[in-house]
Image: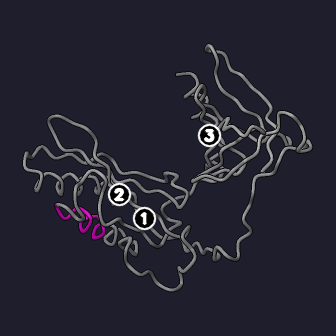
Amino acid sequence: MKKNILILFLFASLSALAQRSLNDYKYAIVPIKFDFLSEPNEYRLNTITKFNLTKMGFEAFYSNEDLPLETAGERCSRVFVNVEKISSLLSTKLVVVFRDCNNVEINRSDVGVSKTKEYKIAYPEALNDAFKSLFTFGYNYNGTVYKPESAKKVETPKSSVEPEDTPNMLFAQPIPNGYQLVDKTPKVVFKIFKTSHPDYFTVQSDTINGALIRKNNEWVLEYYKDDKPVSEKLLIKF
């Protein structure tokens, strides 16, 4: 429990600096199938989602549609919209979730509820109920303009200052949404995952869950062991 509190606290304090709003996005992307359903646009939920996003003021597109040329190469100028089902025995519950291009959650609706037993009625009813809270949000695109990805400088995390022949140096290898850190064996020691802040990663291994933070040009791993906070410096070559 304490290790989860540590991660959430650190993430909240750092990501708050770069937290983005729905108002930063003009284009909303809807998948053609939601994960909890068996086929595309089942119960018309994808159509209903796109319709309601347009009603909110977004320019909404399905993920397989062609977008305006002005967005070419600008994936991070779009917000990605998903509908998730919440387990419930006596009712159907759905929530609308908004994520950025790095899969970081930006916003979510209140839980929409339907007590109708027939799915073909309950799912649309719950989805429309979830959108009620989004309409009260008052979306209004603020005119944020993004440079094409090719024009942006891709920021690679800075390596630790020690030379590469240091025995305990770890080497970062890219994986989806982050890096795996390997030793000279090579053996995967940790997997680290990107957040909205370039100097902060979440960390996973077989034995720990923690946070990796860059402080004074050094990478510091923080986690709990035997209910006590632990802080270790890591030497990393990116």
Which range is magenta? Answer: 43-52
Q: Which residue is mark 3?
A: 202
Return the mark for residue 139.
Answer: 1
Q: Does 34 sit left or right of 233 as displayed? A: left
Residue 48 on the magenta span: yes
Q: Report the number of numbered marks.
A: 3
Q: Position of residue 211 (x, y in %)?
A: 66, 35
Q: Residues within 10 Å of mark 3 (few under 14, many from 20)?
A: many
Is-magenta flag for residue 47?
Answer: yes
Say which residue label 2 marks. 134
Residue type at the position of mark 3 = Thr
Measuring 42% from the left and 64% from the top, which residue is drawn there?
139
| Residue 24 marker | none
Sequence-first tag of 2 and 3: 2
Instruction: Name the front one of labels 2 and 3.
Output: 3
**Amino acid type for the residue under numbered disc 2:** Leu
* Dot 2 alpha-carbon crowd within 10 angstroms: few under 14, some 14 to 19, many 20 or more: some
The picture quadrant where one finds residue 213 is: top right
- Helix, strand or loop under label 1: loop
